[in-house]
Image (tube, grey):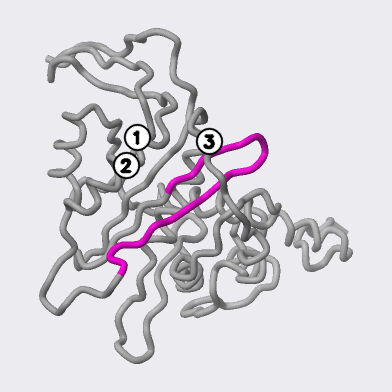
Amino acid sequence: MDRVDGSWLQDGKELAKAHNRLKGRGALLEWRMYHLNQSVSGTEDPWMPLDDWRACEGDPVFQADLRTYAVVRIAHDHRAAAVAIAQRQGERVLLRVRSFPEEPLPEGEYLPASVLEAHLRDLRRRYPAQVLATYRTTPSGKELTTGRPGPEFSYHGSFFEGSAQTLRAERLVMVDVPSTPERLTPAAETLMSLVTSRSLVHDGDAELAAQIGNVLAHPAAKGWAIEAAVDARTHERRRIVGAQAAMLAVHRAMTASKPPSRVMHFGTPRP
């Protein structure tokens, strides 16, 4: 008789290994679909076990001489935003997320971009360690890579491009990173891996914890993806911009390359 590889038909050790492997990268939806043979359409279970999240609470003290990565995310209604900063210190990653505005806006008002711009300038003053920067001296010139004072600031162009151009002119390192499943799913897996291994330190911010709890996992064409839970009262998606910013920031802190010791040229000039 041929051996069947389904983990649910093997001994408990193999089942436990599969569970730990998938949990470690935040893919428990795949665990339920492919190992427990459960239907997960329409699931409302939180993506992150909040007990694990709370276990990572501490006092993240950032160091000015270590590379820092920041991510700006703005809600679609332009009434809320979040800026996450992450820094790798050995095997740990430190995380802080600041939500905007601090008080709810009056009806009909939107979050001014100047508030976010001022916060990013403050972060540059506090965490100037060099990061990798890519630029062109002319629109058709070769792409150059060098080190520039950090942090690296990732943003979504469609909501923040005007501010990004202003800040880029002030030599802040601005990188446009779309909020696509191809970007967010690996970032979510990185965050979950750090949480389950207790390698993340966050400050226990209540708003961030609430947004982490608003994140759901759902089946996607290539496994799974994240989405926001629906509010039972308003029937609108709950906010997860802070959670998304946290995912992307810690992923960047774990994967970003060091800046080169000299300017590097690569690519060919555009016609």
Q: Secondary structure at mark 2?
A: helix
User: For residue 42, which numbered disc appears in the image?
Assistant: none
Looking at the image, is mark 1 or mark 3 earlier in the sequence?
3
Cα–Cα span, label 3 and label 2: 15 Å
Cα–Cα span, label 1 and label 3: 12 Å
In-front residue for pair 174/176: 174
In the picture of the structure, the residue carrying the numbered disc 1 is 125
In-front residue for pair 227/49: 49
Query: Which corner quadrant holds the C terminus?
Result: top left
Q: Secondary structure at mark 1?
A: helix
Q: Residue at x 30, y 88 (%)?
A: 234
Residue 217 seen in render = no
Marks 2/1 in contact by CB < 8 Å: the verdict is yes
Cα–Cα span, label 2 and label 1: 5 Å
* Amino acid under disc 1: Arg
* Amino acid under disc 3: Gln
Majority SS type along the magenta span: strand
* Image coords of residue 255 (percent x, y): 52, 35
In the picture of the structure, the residue carrying the numbered disc 2 is 122
User: For residue 63, which numbered disc appears in the image?
Assistant: 3
Query: Which corner quadrant holds the N terminus?
Result: bottom right
The region drawn magenta spans 85-102
Q: Residue at x 42, y 76 (%)?
A: 229
* Image coords of residue 214 (percent x, y): 45, 73
Q: Secondary structure at mark 3?
A: loop
